[in-house]
Amino acid sequence: MRRAVCSGSFDPVTYGHIDIFERASKMFDEIIVGVFHNIRKKAFFPIDERVSLIREATSHIDNLKVASFSGILPDFMHENSASVIVRGLRSVTDFEYELQEAQMIKHISPDIETIFMLTAQDYYFLSSSGVRELALFHGDVKGLVPPCVEKAINRRISEMSTKI
Ligand code: ADP
């Protein structure tokens, strides 16, 4: 079975990510979305909520599973008998980061390949951080994230404002 992992922090998942999952699901027998805590980024949603939101937003993709992990990606890949990592690329800035990550993974586990899919034209500007910032300033995130994510963002923002 050809199994690939789409890894990321997905905080939150956007239509840009979902487009990559849909296209990757046609190339592999099974896709596992591997959700992790990116230590370079401050979490907006707890990891379990990110997993549930991705499950809800991808229920139309039959050969896709979602799981979280906390160790290193090559260990997660081996535990799940997956040998290909699929990552999305938007810009030169993404490329520089992705190249280093992919080479680090190759150094740790030469059996694992990382492949890149170019962002869809409609989503090249779209990032989780952009969505979070827009939402924090009460901008409309419709069309950028699925409706379930939109609802969760609004809930999270009202929780945050009651804590201030
Ligand atoms: P990470 O925290 O690992 O950078 P992200 O959740 O930000 O994870 O992104 C996961 C993957 O999805 C990365 O490969 C990223 O480049 C890609 N990605 C993010 N936004 C888009 C988009 N709009 N179009 C295509 N790929 C994207």
Image (cartoon, grey):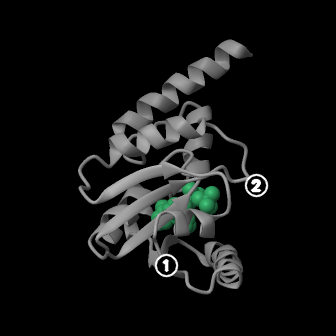
Residue 6 position within the rendered picture, expressed as x and y whole percent measured from the top left: 47, 64
Q: On screen, 81 above or below 150?
A: below
Q: Is residue 13 visible?
A: yes
Identify residue for label 1.
116
- Label 1 near ligand 1 (CB < 8 Å): yes
Provide residue 89's location: percent of width, then percent of height.
Answer: 52, 73
Amino acid under label 1?
A: Phe
Which residue is found at the position 43% from the left and 35% from the top? 150
Secondary structure type for disc 2 = loop
Rendered position, 136 above or below 27: above
Q: Amino acid at mark 2?
A: Arg
Identify whether 133 is placed above or below 96: above
Where is ligand 1, by quadrant?
Answer: bottom right
Foreground residue, 66 or 100? 66
Q: Quadrant of residue 118?
A: bottom left
Find residue 40 and report its image quarter: bottom right
Residue 40 image label: 2
Q: Residue shown at 54%/45% (left/top)?
A: 131
Helix, strand or loop status at disc 1:
strand
Left or right, residue 12 beside residue 98: left
On whether ligand 1 comes within 8 Å of the CB at mark 2, the answer is: yes
Quarter of the N terminus within the rendering: bottom left
Q: Which mark is residue 14?
A: none
Q: Is residue 24 above or below residue 96?
A: above
Residue 141 visible in the picture: no
The numbered mark, 1 or 2, whose residue comes first in the sequence reads 2
| Front-lying residue, 106 or 162 | 106
- In which quarter of the view is residue 105 placed? bottom right
Count of numbered marks: 2
